[in-house]
């Protein structure tokens, strides 16, 4: 009889331990509990979302270019149209309000005309190439969840080899022109009802180095504006435009030191159509 009593008492004691333990240690929500849980139910960071946003896509750039310069007192100018295919990407770090974006483009379909003092008419330009690589790093500390404003620093390498007649008129043996441009500017980005986004940027170009057929230093400005519509949770279509203008008082011709080149103006602008994936 005593053994049965001891067995029953032991079983009752073991069954009461969970309730007793709950009173002592608590569930983490009772202010009177003796000890608390180490973590809340939502401690897992995966429930709070990834702070990084990614965009990658394809753009079509209908690019219009123009150049003006004076060679030994004779005025020279050209205009061209090119069709550029561009790959682009962007990474936003929402935890630091910073972003990194880049693009690479190349055009194979090019046409245009040029004029020069002493040359009759406007001869055609139908050979050449245009390519570029650009990268920007920005910081947007001002604003709300819908609108962010900040600044950025950027670099662009432009191989503007559209005008193959330029070398002939400045007595140069090389006909390619390369531009290394530094950009310092401001950016603004707005998202409206998770459907529409607007991206605006404007920058000064305090320094741009010419290499190739010409050598020298230029300065100028650039800007861009894009309007987008989120057609789904992970796909956006945008339209807009971009422009860059550079100027300088003089440049040298590395292969012909006797030639004087002054009053340089280079401009490239046009319309953009973009399709972008977001994740």
Image (cartoon, rainbow, N blue to C red):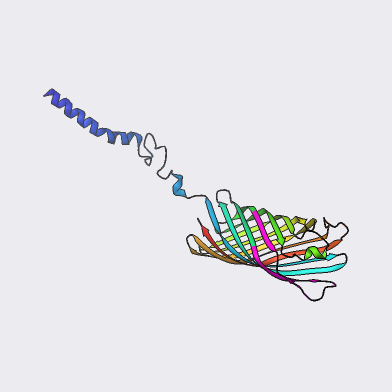
Q: Nearer the viewer, residue 135 or 146?
A: 135
Q: Nearer the viewer, residue 132 or 94?
A: 132
Query: Eyeballing the image, is 23 above or below 2?
Result: below
| Residue in view at x 88 percent, y 58 percent | 258
How many marks overall?
0
> x%, y% of residue 101?
61, 54
Query: Eyeballing the image, is 253 above or below 119?
Result: above
Q: Nearer the viewer, residue 192 or 113?
A: 113
Specify the segment rendered in magenta.
Answer: 107-135
Which of the 4 image quadrants contains residue 129?
Answer: bottom right
> x%, y% of residue 3?
14, 23
> x%, y% of residue 33?
36, 36
| Residue in view at x 24 percent, y 31 percent | 14
Tell me if 47 is positioned left or right of 162 in this view: left
> x%, y% of residue 146?
55, 59
Q: Is residue 193 magenta?
A: no
Which of the 4 image quadrants contains residue 2?
Answer: top left
Which of the 4 image quadrants contains residue 108?
Answer: bottom right
> Image quadrant for the N terminus?
top left
**Furthest-bottom residue in this view:** 121
**Furthest-top residue in this view:** 2
Query: Eyeballing the image, is 235 above or below 30?
Result: below
**Furthest-front residue in this view:** 173
**What kind of secondary structure does the magenta stretch mostly adopt?**
strand
| Residue in view at x 13 percent, y 26 percent | 4
């Amino acid at each position: 009889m005593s053994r049965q009593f001891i067995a029953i008492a032991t079983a009752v004691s073991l069954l009461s331990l969970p309730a007793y333990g709950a009173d002592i240690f608590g569930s983490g929500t009772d202010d009177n509990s003796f000890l608390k849980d180490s973590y809340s139910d939502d401690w897992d960071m995966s429930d709070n979302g990834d702070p990084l946003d990614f965009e990658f896509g394809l753009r079509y750039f209908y690019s219009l270019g123009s150049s003006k310069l004076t060679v030994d007192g004779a005025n020279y100018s050209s205009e061209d149209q090119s069709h550029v295919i561009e790959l682009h990407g962007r990474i936003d770090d929402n935890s630091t309000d910073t972003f990194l974006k880049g693009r690479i483009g190349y055009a194979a379909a090019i046409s245009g005309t040029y004029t020069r003092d002493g040359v009759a008419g406007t001869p055609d330009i139908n050979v050449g190439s245009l390519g570029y690589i650009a990268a920007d790093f920005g910081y947007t500390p001002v604003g709300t969840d819908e609108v962010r404003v900040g600044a950025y620093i950027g670099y662009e390498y432009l191989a503007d080899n559209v005008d193959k007649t330029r070398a002939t008129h400045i007595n140069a043996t090389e006909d390619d022109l390369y531009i290394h441009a530094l950009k310092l500017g401001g950016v603004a980005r707005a998202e409206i009802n998770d459907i529409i986004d607007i991206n605006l940027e404007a920058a000064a170009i305090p320094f741009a180095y010419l290499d190739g057929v010409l050598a020298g230093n230029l300065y100028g400005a650039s800007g861009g504006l894009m309007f987008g519509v989120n057609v789904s949770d992970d796909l956006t279509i945008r339209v807009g435009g971009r422009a860059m203008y550079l100027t300088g008082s003089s440049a040298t011709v590395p292969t012909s030191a006797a030639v004087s080149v002054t009053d340089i103006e280079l401009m490239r602008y046009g319309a953009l159509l973009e399709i972008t994936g977001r994740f």
